Amino acid sequence: MELPPLTMEQLSQLVASNAPPSQLFEALSRYELQACLISTGSNGPNAGGDDSTLLSMFYSSFFLVHLLTDQVSEARALTKRIPEALLQYDPSLQNCLTLLRAVWQTQHAQVYQVLRGLPWPDALQPLVRRYESFFQDKTLIAVSRSYEAIRLATAAIHLGLDEQLAEKEDPNIISNFTKCGWSWDSESKLLHPKPIMVSPTEPQSSNGIRKAMAMLGTRTC
Amino acid sequence: MHHGATSKLYCVRHCLRLRGDERQVMRYERHQMLRIRSMTCQIISYNLSGRNVVGQGKRDESKVWRGVSIPLSDLPTFPGSPNNHHNSPTSHFSTNIHIPTTVGFLLQTSYQTSLLPPLLFSSSSNLESPSYCNPDTTKAKESRNRTHLCAFVAKLSCALLSYLARMTLLSDIISASAHLHSSNHLPSDEYDRRIRELVEYFRRLQTTKALESFANDESFLDRFDPAIDSIPFLFVLRVQIQKVQELNADLYPADIRPSGKLWTRAAHFLTSFDGVQVRYAGREWRLLVELVGQASQAASTPLLGATLVKDAMLRLDPSCAVFTSTHLLLVRLCLQAKAYSCALPVLNKRICHFPISLGRPSSEPSVLCADHGSSVSFMTEASEVSSKISYRDYLQYFLYGGMVYMALKEWRKALHFLGIVISMPSTSSVSLIMVEAYKKWVLVGLLEKGKLCPPPSMTTPHVVKVYQSLARPYIILAHTFERGDLKKLNAEIDAAMGVWSADKNLGLVAQVVAVFFSQTVIKLGKTFAALTMADLPKQVSLCAEVTGPAVSSLIMSRALNATLVQTKDHAESSMLRFSSIHSLPRLSHELDLQSQLKQEMKLMETLVINLGETNNNLGLSDEYVDTLHKGQVWSGSSEVNPTGGETGLEMDEDLMGDMS
């Protein structure tokens, strides 16, 4: 099937769609060839001044979709395929690099800070929000397996919840965890996670995890 | 249609042969055409924007002219005119050839054009007083004009001839291709015969250079769908590419480079060709794939080439079980493009065969189009789907494949690929590629297992000695790593910085330092059941601020199989528990194992199919038949065992037994 030309409209439509990450990845992978041609100036006479905006939008989206499909190493490789001049001066791509660094070093608090605090273009917001949700899901599973007992504040940091409220043992935050099957020991002030299992053949998009994360509710406090 | 056109050709040629009659031409000029009352035959009218021309004929006294269609590109350029008729700004051009009742001719244009010198031509309405008949024109000029006119008409005549011959050929090609379409329902041997005939036909056309008549015909490929007419499309595309290369000093001119006209055609073909048809034109397919790869490299866009090469490989042989020269091309392109995951669909497939020559030369060729269990049946040496593969190519492929996995931090798979390289059988000299692979093997072994991994057991001892001698700094580094002293490790790394840099292994060495901490913590798990986080920094030579988050990160990334137990009090240290009592992670681990087992099972199924094919091919090989024959002779003389094959095998065992 013939691929429609890579345009801002086409890209925005794709990014805003609720397509599964794997489909988004597939579609953007195919568009990378067009982006490559545009960046090398081989795209014919129509290549104009808006190319850098289009390329920035494309590469930022593609980068986020790499993370959304849990391909961190390949996301890093993508940053090496982006034209150097664009990467150096484009604010959106600079945000991507900061995000990559935080993800690479598993600095959870930094990841949420980059996703929520840095200025992302409106067109990218759907993907940014999706990745935030994905990262939270993934971290919840990891924390549930890594800790036998965890302080509420530590859990809140890992999951991007309000640390101040957690320190005050906010019942809403506690209930978010207890709804996931974790137990709260009010004496020891510790959460006892219930490990979440994900079948290797089923990625984290399984309904069970989605439901669990929907219970967390207060992501942005 | 072409038969009618051919008859017209003879008519035109007959008339144009008269061009050499100088006397009549002079007479014609002298009388300024006033006396000439010719039958006008508009034979050509074409435009630059359109592809073809509509020829219109008017009734001649003796012949009926129906007209022909000629693409603009086929027409000759008039001598002395700008050689730019492909890009001429003229939007429409028509030429009339006036054929006098006597002899002589006149070419006339009814529209301004850059194709023909305006001096010689005027509009139809000016026939009686043509502007070119300037009384001041010198005789030399007239003579030159006449010569030019004659030459032009000669060329035009040739163009007509060539065009009509081309139309005949095109018609033949279309009918030959249609003949193949109608063969889809036939049994495979009949279909096989027809494809072979078609490919032979095209090879003949290529040898006789008949296909070159389509070399500049851009519209030709529009007539064929590469998914259905893969053979005609491929052959003509190859000819067009060759022609463009011949006309340009550059081996990869703009048309062939990404987004060029021919590149687009090649990309269309490589993503949609019929895999069965192309089995019969392996050589042409390979040359096209190689060209695409090289052109993308020349244009500094290896990603474009890598994607197309990968798609083409998977289309021709989805199992990718036969090693070909294209494997190496793909991995090299992916490394250059830093598009590592692009290589994975091919790298993750198990290679089980090299292209082999099937049977003896006299034997019947196999039916390539049939459904084969293994691709080795049609990816043969004779199909030339791969260029000659050398020992070096094989080593390079696995080294590069290992590098792709290293880039993706899939250390286990990288070790597997590097292991294939370093255990390559060698009798005397050792390839430098093997030595380079061994250096990476040492570093990847540290990253994956935290220790110096011995080479695979099948590695020849003398090769191991060579490795130990040529990769000494790496072995020293590995021993220091194993001893667990971070300071010494850093000192060793600093001391041999030039070596890592020269070998381009600096990145891997840096990761070895980074992984030192995790490997040390993992080793602690073999000694302790649990440790407080306060005790850990002493064991791993790190400060407490860094240790906590680092351990947490290790566990969450599943690099370390342990759990953390925090306490209520911040001041009180958390506990790191190596032997976890968490039951569910174990269950999860079992699920992982189950998934791995499923993958291994699929792999085994693939291997069994390919093993059967290999067994079959070995059974048909000359060596096996000779051995079998010798075994029969031996068995016949001793009259021990009438079953020749098994006797041959037993003989070997007995001989070995005697010797021992």
Image: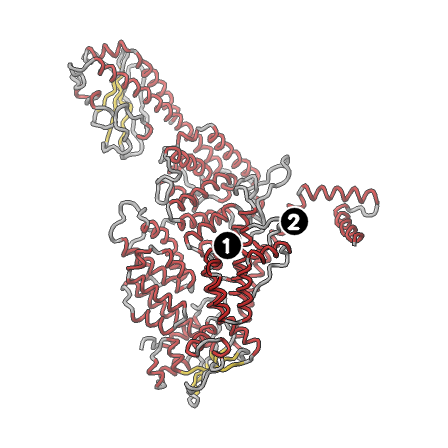
Picture coordinates of residue B6, whole percent (x, y): 38, 22
Placement of B158 over or under B606, stated as above or below: above
Q: Quadrant of residue B299?
A: top left
Does label 1 or label 2 sit earlier along the sequence?
Answer: 1
The amino acid on which the numbered mark 1 sits, given as a three-letter code, is: Gly
Q: Is residue A76 left or right of residue B393?
A: left
Outermost bottom residue: A187
Q: Nearer the viewer, residue B59 or B199?
A: B199
Q: Is residue B298 left or right of residue B485?
A: left
Q: Nearer the viewer, residue B467 or B50?
A: B467
Residue at image point 30% right, 21% down = B152
- 10 Å neighbourhood of mark 1: few (<14), some, or many (≥20)? many
Please indicate, yes or no, whether residue B243 appears anywhere in the rendered image: yes
Residue at image point 39% right, 70% down = A135
How many numbered circles are shown?
A: 2
Q: Quadrant of residue B623?
A: top right
